[in-house]
Image (cartoon, grey):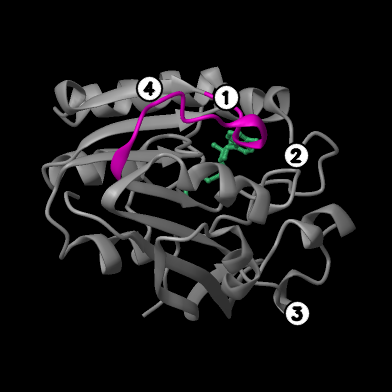
């Protein structure tokens, strides 16, 4: 099946790609950037979990937050873009799930859980301007005992050959993230999953680098 929920079709060579003002500008335009549909690895991995509390870091316009809320989760959408969060909150209101959502403006590069823990922490295509392994190390603090952490991003591929060196550095393989896991975190999925997308008018296969881990303990 051709999946059109591609996260690579927006001026990725812009010099401000990794910074908040660039994302604010993108989310302040008149058009939606993303499809609003949930990401496929989220649906694949979370559908079988018992709903509880969740955080989606890099939530953008809120597609994954809204889907999670519709499945019964109470969800915190987190992003460093105030414009993205405002748009996500509007979409949650329109979808009738505002009462199951809240919003947290936070930079993944300096993320601190500040005592908050969630049964599910998820992040899709964040690609921050710092090593993802460092972000994942920070995110583990926010996972409640018995909870799950799902991290999905673009695996390096020839398909992205024309992107900038910075963009290439932002891509990773799932196994690259394993050193971030403290004791007590059990890897469940460490994979690259193929996905077919439309890119520059062509149908191409890309890989979703997918890491799912569970924090040992009860609850979640
Ligand atoms: C490619 S979009 C993905 C949006 C959404 N997760 C999805 O899959 O449709 C990346 C998102 O991460 C956010 N982001 C990028 N770097 C960030 C950082 N350092 N801290 C917090 N959010 C960041 C951007 O504002 C943007 O909303």
- Corner quadrant of residue 202: bottom right
Question: Looking at the picture, how far across and down is residue 32, in whole percent?
Answer: 47, 36
**Disc 1 element:** loop
Point out the stretch of residues depicted in magenta. Answer: 106-119
Residue that appears at 38% across and 28% down: 88
Residue that appears at 58% across and 49% down: 137
Is-magenta flag for residue 108? yes
Separation (CA) of disc 3 from disc 4: 36 Å
Mark 1 neighbour class, 10 Å CA radius: few under 14, some 14 to 19, many 20 or more? many
Question: Looking at the picture, how far across and down is residue 56, in whole percent?
Answer: 40, 41
Residue under label 1: 81
Q: Depth-wise, is mark 4 or mark 2 nearer the camera?
A: 4
Mark 4 neighbour class, 10 Å CA radius: few under 14, some 14 to 19, many 20 or more? many
**Disc 3 element:** helix
Question: Looking at the picture, how far across and down is residue 85, in whole percent?
Answer: 45, 23
Residue under label 4: 103
Labels 3 and 4: the sequence-earlier one: 4
* Contact between labelled residues 2 and 4, with CB atoms less than 8 Å apart: no
Residue under label 2: 17
């Amino acid at each position: 099946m051709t999946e059109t929920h591609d996260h690579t079709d927006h001026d990725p060579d812009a010099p401000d790609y990794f910074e908040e003002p660039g994302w604010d500008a993108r989310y302040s335009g008149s058009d939606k950037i993303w499809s609003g549909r949930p990401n496929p690895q989220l649906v694949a991995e979370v559908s079988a979990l018992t709903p509880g509390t969740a955080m989606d870091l890099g939530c953008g316009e809120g597609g994954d937050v809204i889907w999670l809320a519709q499945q019964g989760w109470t969800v915190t959408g987190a992003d460093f873009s105030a414009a993205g969060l405002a748009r996500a909150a509007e979409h949650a209101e329109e979808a009738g799930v505002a009462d199951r959502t809240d919003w947290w403006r936070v930079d993944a590069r300096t993320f601190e859980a500040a005592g908050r823990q969630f049964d599910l922490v998820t992040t899709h295509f964040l690609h921050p301007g710092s090593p993802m392994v460092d972000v994942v190390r920070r995110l583990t603090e926010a996972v409640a005992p018995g909870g799950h952490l799902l991290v999905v991003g673009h695996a390096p591929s020839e398909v992205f050959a024309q992107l900038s060196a910075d963009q290439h550095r932002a891509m990773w393989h799932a196994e690259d993230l394993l050193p971030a896991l403290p004791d007590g975190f059990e890897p469940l999925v460490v994979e690259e999953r193929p996905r077919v997308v439309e890119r520059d008018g062509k149908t191409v296969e890309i890989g979703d680098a997918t890491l799912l881990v569970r924090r040992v303990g009860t609850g979640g």
